[in-house]
Amino acid sequence: MIDFSPWITPLLLMPGVALLILSTAVRYNRLHGEVHEAEKRHVGHAVIHDATLAFRARRFCNALVGLYVAVSLIALAALSGVVAVVGFESGSRVGIGLTGLSVVAILYSSTQLIREARRSLEVLEDHLNRDARGAGYG
């Protein structure tokens, strides 16, 4: 009986990583739109606003790169699993190592997304506080 787990196991991570890529790309695209809106309103020249948007964009980019690296490592791990199934025992160890590296890349990307989510909350709270003060609530 052939054991397919060396190449199937890494692929089980793929749907979760794909969802992270999709949601991160959508959020990155929204940030891109926010930058263009700021330019239209001539807010883009405000130093703090520019720095915040650039900082957030860098985090999203880092997260996406990490997720793309994870996908590549998962694919390589699955490929090495196929090699192991064919009969080269060392392929199994390589696959396990690559799967481990892909999990590290996913953790890195998740950390970047957590940091970005916290920063987005700070920006949102700042805008809400500024609006509340302007309306006489603060």
Image (spheres, grey):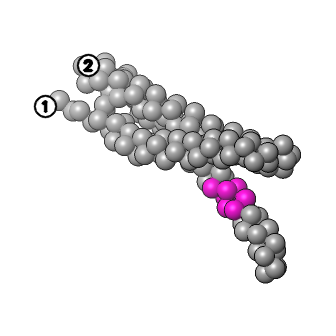
Residue 64 falls in image quadrant? top right
Does 5 appear in magenta? no
Mark 1 = which residue? 1
Mark 2 = which residue? 87
Task: Tell me: residue 25, above or below residue 135.
Answer: above
Q: Nearer the viewer, residue 115 or 85?
A: 115
Residue at x 37%, y 36% (from the top left corner): 10
Work out which quarter of the rendered image holds the C terminus and state it.
Answer: bottom right
Residue at x 62%, y 37% (from the top left corner): 61
Does 118 appear in magenta? yes
x%, y% of residue 87?
26, 19
x%, y% of residue 85?
25, 24
Work out which quarter of the rendered image holds the N terminus and state it.
Answer: top left
x%, y% of residue 23?
49, 47
Residue at x 66%, y 52% (from the top left corner): 115
Task: Tell me: residue 120, above or below residue 57.
Answer: below
Can residue 40 be seen from the camera position used here?
A: yes
